[in-house]
Amino acid sequence: MICRAFAVCGLLLVLAQVPALAAEPAIAVTTDAGSSEDEQLVELEEVIVYGNDGNLVEGISAESELDAAGIAAYGANTVGDLLAMVAPDVDNTQEGPVILINGRPANGINSVNDLPSESVQSVQVLTPQAASALGYAPTRRVINVVLRQSFRQDLANVTVRGATAGRGLSSNANLSSLQLSGNSYRNFALRAWKTEPRLEAHRDIQNQPSSVPYDLVGNVLSYPVAGGDIDPALTAITGFPVTVLGVPVGTGDPALDDFVPLANIANTSSMGRYRTMIADQYSYALNGNWQMQLPRRIALSLNGSVDRSHSESLSGATTTLLHLPASSPFTPFSQDVGIARYLGAPLQQSSKPLTANLSSSLNTQLGRYRVFLSTSVNWRRSSTISERRVDTAALQAALDDGTLNPFAPLPAEMLDEVLVDRSRSRGFNGTVNLQASGTAFKLPAGNATLSMRGELRRNRQRSRTEGTTNFSSRLNRQDELAFASMQLPLLGGATPMAFGMGAELSGSARDVSSIGTLFDHGFGLNLRKGNRLTMRIGMNQERVAPQPEALTNPVVTIDDFRTYDFIRQETVLVRYITGGNPDLDIERRRTVRIGGTVRPFVAMDLNFNAEYQRTIGRDAVSQLPAVSEDVQAAFPDRYRRDAEGRLVEVDARLVSFARSHTESLRWGGNFRRSFGVPQQQTPQSATAATVTFISSDGSGVDELSGAGWRLNANFTHTWQLENTRLARAGLPAQDLLAGGAGTGSGISRHTVQGRAGLAYNGTGAQLTTNWKSRTRITAGTTADPNDLVFSPLLRLDLSAFANLGTVFPGAPLVAGLRVTLAVENLLDAKQRVRDEDGITPLRYQPYLINALGRTVSLSLRKTF
């Protein structure tokens, strides 16, 4: 079937070509960094970088820029590491920022993740309207990675990390090779990662006593209901009722008198060595990128990646209450009793996901329009084996027949039959995407730009779970998208520092098979005063279909999953169910954003930014919240309790909330400065590799050598003004900032993130700060509430690096060698959780919140 989205996009593109083709833009360069009289216009064949006056789409410029020396000051090994440091300050959306390479859309984050940081000339954050102008959702931000014009490097990196509390080792290694030549490059990378398991026994985790006292040796209880008098004859001997008996150790044929010393004393066994907090994991991945310049100014990019991982975790032991009849020749009791035991080896869960991706793109200029055609194919396969329990049917039959002594070592062959769930899933995703951006027509204040995108996406998902749980799901879905946006300059002047104002309109129609057509629209108003002040007001109305994986993921059941029951205020081990939910609704979302950036000083790289965001969602998809009185009333079928009211099962598959409302104010600042940096002379022959862009304030932005002192600092404060949600009509709305149970750890009203770094001649340090304010969750019931308080938490991460080739320039053996020493959670901060009596629930033991604590890592990086 012909995709209607492509037909619409193609028609608009043909109509837009009716005006005469525009000439290629010129960029102002200087041939002498110290003389402005030698300025000249050089006609470049391709605009490969953004400067403050050089735009891929007219009216879109860089809001901030990090040059090569500034990048070196962060000590990042790869571009992926660098973006992990700076991107959260730019785009905190779930999708993350749009990544461009040399002004062209990249084939996803894999296109830049493994590039060495030395290969980057600059990283530029574009103004907020750039995403819409390039054909992407207007709620996202755009980061442009500008590569050097000539570069070649092979790289090897090894990192070892360990927890100072012990038993917390992990390591990773990667090899990569890069060749850059003009607009062509090749990059290949191999990564491997290994994490050693951490058992609860390694952190002395305490377990909540169960109503049934299970033990590796065993405890005797009344049967069929525990808690009653076990045997009148034993009561006559002791002189008091006996409701629990520890099984004596060292005798396989105990008499009634052997049990007397253990009357009402239960055996206890720690399950710490049977349960993991962090699984035994390893993974390896191969990633390759290839970009070449074809005739007629066409750029072809290819990306291929394969990622395989494996994890093994322990989830406890089989719990069973064996029935020992009074007729058994091995019982000393005059009536039927039960024996509560842990059986067999630790239960394991193993997971083996495999993903493979192949993507390609063609990028060219057709007259005044930049055209981008991309295709991608993603294939996923995953298998999970979950051991649920030992099959005790044969064991119980032998007890009933009187052929098995339950007080002697149990035959191994009776414990070999382990019941398991096998979950398998396969997924295929294919996408074809066509985008076009360029000048549509002229207005008195400037040129109006038009961006169009057509997309065809095909999803096939299949999953199946077999064993003690049986479930199957299948999904074939086709999405057809037509998107268009228009940038309209309303006011503007001829000088770079003139006041400007523009409007932005966007809309899309997405036809989803089996669902229907979903319409989105948005508009924005942009204001600027050169590069000193930018402001944006935007509103977007969206209808969002659930992701295919959210509908079809296989059902996976974990026994003895630790959770906290806020109603009964106790830590319990439950049967925990995850997987897809085919009944999720279409989410309707309305978002309003008001933001701006100000640069108060021309001669100082200092800017402040702020953004207010208000989002209202209806039928919003979310994780199942922690169980509280309100949550259980909203989703009663997701929680199952026993006859005593104790929580025994949680079905934690995704749910839809009738309404959600969030408001936040996010503001911060960025500062960078260099000290004692020598002047760099630009070569006389101006080429694309050595051009110096002329900023709007007239100062040159040079590619710096990295000498001298470099200081960088930033901070971001997020203030949650409102966060409420309504699960069902007729129920009270939950205020997640005032006691509502959301994630199980509360939502902080205030969070602050900051980073400060100082570097000198290839040696430097970075300090990262994360702080969140106190939170609380109201536990108990409406008649008897009890606040659970989560204390404020401050986390500091410190890393120091040294390029030994710079520190010891006369030692060829250390040329290209960098050593990095990092301490994560420098203060070994731990979240403290207390109820009104000052008691910490067992679920919130510090190492259950953060299993590692403080960690120290050493990294060796060698370039060739």
Image (cartoon, rainbow, N blue to C red):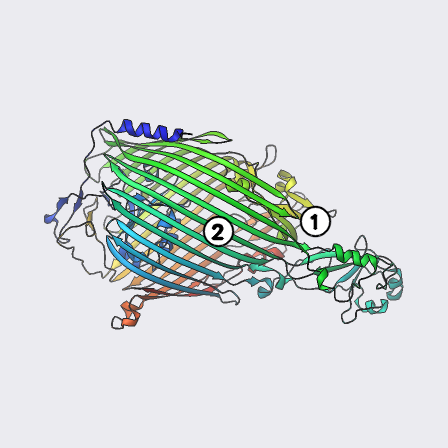
| Nearer the observer, 322 or 374 | 374
Q: Is residue 703 left or right of residue 585?
A: left
Q: Is residue 194 left or right of residue 800?
A: right
Determine the CA span between mark 2 and mark 1.
39 Å
Which residue is label 2 attached to? 354
The amino acid on which the numbered mark 2 sits, given as a three-letter code, is Leu
Residue ranking furthest to the left: 37
Question: Secondary structure under badge 2?
Answer: strand
Q: Is residue 78 left or right of residue 499?
A: right
The answer to whether residue 21 shows anywhere in this view is yes
Which residue is label 1 attached to? 646
- Looking at the image, which residue is at 37% across and 31% down? 6
Q: Earlier in the sequence, mark 2 or mark 1?
A: 2
| Nearer the observer, 598 or 463 | 463
- Image quarter of the N terminus: top left
- Looking at the image, which residue is at 61% across and 60% down? 275
- Looking at the image, which residue is at 33% across and 42% down? 361
Q: On residue 85, which mark appears?
A: none
Classed neighbour count for the residue bearing mark 1: other residues with Cα under 10 Å, few (<14), some (14–19), many (≥20): some
| Nearer the observer, 481 or 411 | 411
Q: Quadrant of residue 7?
A: top left
Mark whose residue sits in front, 2 or 1:
2
- Image quarter of the C terminus: bottom left
Examine the rendered structure and indicate whether residue 515 appears above or below residue 534: above
Q: Quadrant of residue 239?
A: bottom right
Which x, y percent locates residue 28? 17, 44
Question: Label 1 near label 2: C-beta < 8 Å?
Answer: no
